Amino acid sequence: MNSIIDRHLSIPITSQAKKIAKQFADNIQDASTSQQVYHNTLAVLTVNDYLAMLGIATNLKDSESWHPALRVCADVADLKIAGLGHLECRPVLPEAEICVVPPDVWEDRIGYVAVRIESSQKTATLLGFAQTAGTGKLVINCLQPLAALLYHLDRLRHPHLVNLPQWFANLGAEGWQNLEDIINSFSLSGMQMAYRSPNFQISARNEVNSQDINSLTEILQSHQDEWTKIQVAELLGKIDPGNESAIAALTGILHIGKTDESRRQAAVSLGKIDPSNLAAGARRAKIIDFEQSLGNLQVTLVMTLIPDKKGEINISLRVYAVNNLYLPTNLELAVFDEFGNIALVAEARNTDNWIQLEFSGEPGNDFIVQITLEDVVWQEQFLV
Amino acid sequence: MPNLENDNISEVKIANFPSESTWQAIASHQTAVSRVDDSLVKLIAETCQHPPGSLKRQLGLDRIIRRIINSGRLWIENAPYYEDALQQTWLYFCRNLCEATTTKEPYNPQRSNIFTWLDRYLKGRLKDMYLKNCHEQNIRVNNSEEIILTIPAPVNTIPLEDQIRAWAEADATGELVATHIANRPELNCQLLILRRLPPKSQWEELAAEFNISMSTLNSFYRRKCIPYLQRHFQPDLG
């Protein structure tokens, strides 16, 4: 994956930064503390320069690392982000694979940036971001890209969550559409393969009427395969809302469906014709642009919610390419929990039509979905 | 042997003349470069659509800077002040790419390539710093005696560690000893501050020695003891 290197960003270390770092370090007699303070200060000032470039206001004076006594008594390398809190900027020596976060700074931090001080001391490399200190040892290759830091700071400033329970009430969210609308307006080859197949003629029609129910239930009885169940479930969702036989057939699929996919489709269809049903599901999709160095690429994120027996919501995420059968290799889909810890991750390999993640969320919890391709990172936060 | 000379010339000519595959390589390199440039122009236009300070503007700038750095096409020079000039260039770049903040006009992709625009500013700063550097060296050479005389004597000769140790040991108000972990009077701020002064005891060692969890110890130190240090010693002016 070439992106590991591309995710890093080297920032020049200015003579002013070295001067301040030396001044702070010279005030301390103990050699190892003095050295640590020197590196901490360089890391803080490098991140400060990076944020200044992007127009993010900081306040060095209010940083713990700017307090002479605190520098001696605690291993602090924080940078106060105006109005948000302290961002810890941990220095990492060249060749290190782990960024050590000392217990001194496990609390009162809005995040951690690992900064490698190159041996030339002419540049520092911003290696990545972590929202929490975890066990105090951050594996550098597993850090989130810097873009995740920018999303994180923006969320702290302007909290914005997509409210998933509203999808059950058929309320939308910005940019999220019904899957059918997206399929109709784009050529989603990979998606059509998964969600439609030419097994029987009814599937070609966009409308299904109540006369079709008998034939659909017959098909259901004679074909036990999952594809049939998925398709019948999809078609039953096109019947006029409230149709008792259709509801009964869908409830049947919900109980006999072998894979989650047929049950998921039955729940989504049930949501369309019987929204108040406790087993009803919801599905929305969003088109996401990835402007790449060698041309544009669009993907669709399909999110399906079904209530499960424990009162939690089962959430399935699928990513498809738009206008292409296959996803680009190395496209990564990840889910982070409310503390910013990575919970799940999937990566597209050659000839993947789609990638999927599935998990359960308790009402009231939130999570972040991240899709990464080359140097582009897309994130959105959701409330269960 | 005139023939040999002629042969040599023709050989030289052949060797200097790029083969067809070299031309193809050059052409495809140029195509790749111009494709990268085109995509950079598009990315700049897209980024500038978003208002300054917005997340999308920040994400766009981050990607543009990364692409420019990774292209390796920016002017490099082995000058002691190169990093200063480069950082000034990045600030100039971010502040004037979409809107003119410190210049008369913002970057105009029709007028110049982004690398040309950046290099021109970077070289300008390098020149300024070169002149300033020479000027300062001149002053230093000419006024070396005077400079030695004007070096101020250190204001405070007591190292900071010793100042903190003396303050904590004295605990004039008694507040450092009085502030302790619940039911553990021996685990007070005086002890912790002294033990965390260089050469400091590690948190793991302290936790084992006093049979208490590291997080309790560390959390207490952060919430209760650090504020005394913050209050008693003045911060630096940033």
Image (spheres, coloured by chain):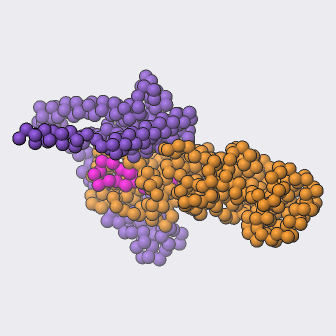
Chain colours: A orange, B purple
Q: Predominant secondary structure in magenta?
A: strand
Residue visible at 58% across and 49% down in the picture: A378
| Residue B76 in sight in this render | yes
Residue A354: percent from left, percent from top? 63, 58
Q: Residue furthest left?
A: B1
Quadrant housing residue B7: top left
Residue A66 sits above or below residue A29 on the image: above
Determine whether A224 is above or below A22 in the image: below
| Along the line of sight, the residue nearer the viewer: B50 or A374 | A374
A236 or A363: nearer the viewer: A236
- Magenta segment boundaries in residue numbering: A111-126
Choose top left, top right, bottom left or bottom right for residue B147.
Answer: top left
Asked whether residue A341 is in view, the answer is no
**Image quadrant where one finds the C terminus of chain A:** bottom right
Q: Residue drawn at (75%, 58%), measured in percent from left and top? A: A197
Rendering coords of residue B36 (x, y %): 45, 40
Q: Residue furthest top?
A: B104
Task: Indicate left or right for A234 with B58 as reference.
Answer: right
| Residue A123 within the segment the image draws in magenta | yes
Q: Is residue A374 above or below residue A32?
A: above
Image location of residue B124, percent across then percent down = 30, 30
| A66 left or right of B138 in image | right
Observer-nearest of A152 and A28? A152
Magenta stretch contains residue A18: no
* Tally of marks: 0
Name the residue: 33% across, 48% down.
A123
Percent x, y for residue B104? 43, 22
Q: Residue at x 54, y 50 (%)?
A: A377
